[in-house]
Image (cartoon, rainbow, N blue to C red):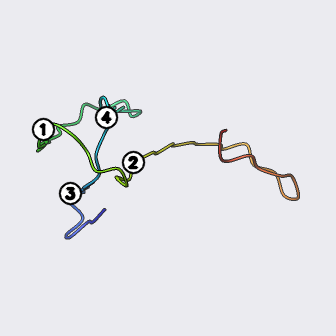
Amino acid sequence: FSNPEGRSFNCNIPMPFKRSAKVVIINESTKPITIFYGINFLKVKQLPENAAYFHAHWNRNNLTKLGKILKYCQK
């Protein structure tokens, strides 16, 4: 991710997806937002045996307490 001048974020993920990819953008504010996006992909017949795959998980927890274990990663 990068934020060159406080105006935009860019994300480049050069990793294969076996079946599909899903990107979800949620506006949790009360104001409308404008977004711009572009998706570039290359369809191939077969991936190499050692191809890596991208996995991501996002979590927000505003109820943290001092001294209490915060479970962050899901299994």
- Apparent side of residue 73 relative to residue 32 in the rendered image (left or right): right
Instruction: Tell me the residue that label 4 is attached to.
Output: 23
Q: Nearer the viewer, residue 61 or 41?
A: 41
Quadrant of res 3 = bottom left
In the picture, the quarter occupied by the N terminus is bottom left
Answer with mark 1 or mark 2, whichever residue precedes in sequence. Answer: 1
Answer with mark 1 or mark 4, whichever residue precedes in sequence. Answer: 4
Answer with mark 3 or mark 1, whichever residue precedes in sequence. Answer: 3
- Apparent side of residue 38 relative to residue 48 in the rendered image (left or right): left
The residue that appears at 13% across and 43% down in the rendered structure is 41
| Neighbour tally class for label 1: few under 14, some 14-19, many 20 plus, Cα within 10 Å | few
| Neighbour tally class for label 2: few under 14, some 14-19, many 20 plus, Cα within 10 Å | few
The amino acid on which the numbered mark 3 sits, given as a three-letter code, is Ser
The amino acid on which the numbered mark 2 sits, given as a three-letter code, is Phe
* Number of callouts: 4
Instruction: Tell me the residue that label 1 is attached to.
Output: 43
**Mark 1 touching mark 2, by CB under 8 A?**
no
Instruction: Tell me the residue that label 2 is attached to.
Output: 54
Q: Position of residue 9 (x, y in %)?
A: 25, 57
The answer to whether 32 is drawn above or below residue 46 in the figure is above
> The residue tagged with tag 4: helix, strand or loop?
loop
Q: Position of residue 57 (x, y in %)?
A: 51, 42
Instruction: Tell me the residue that label 3 is attached to.
Output: 8
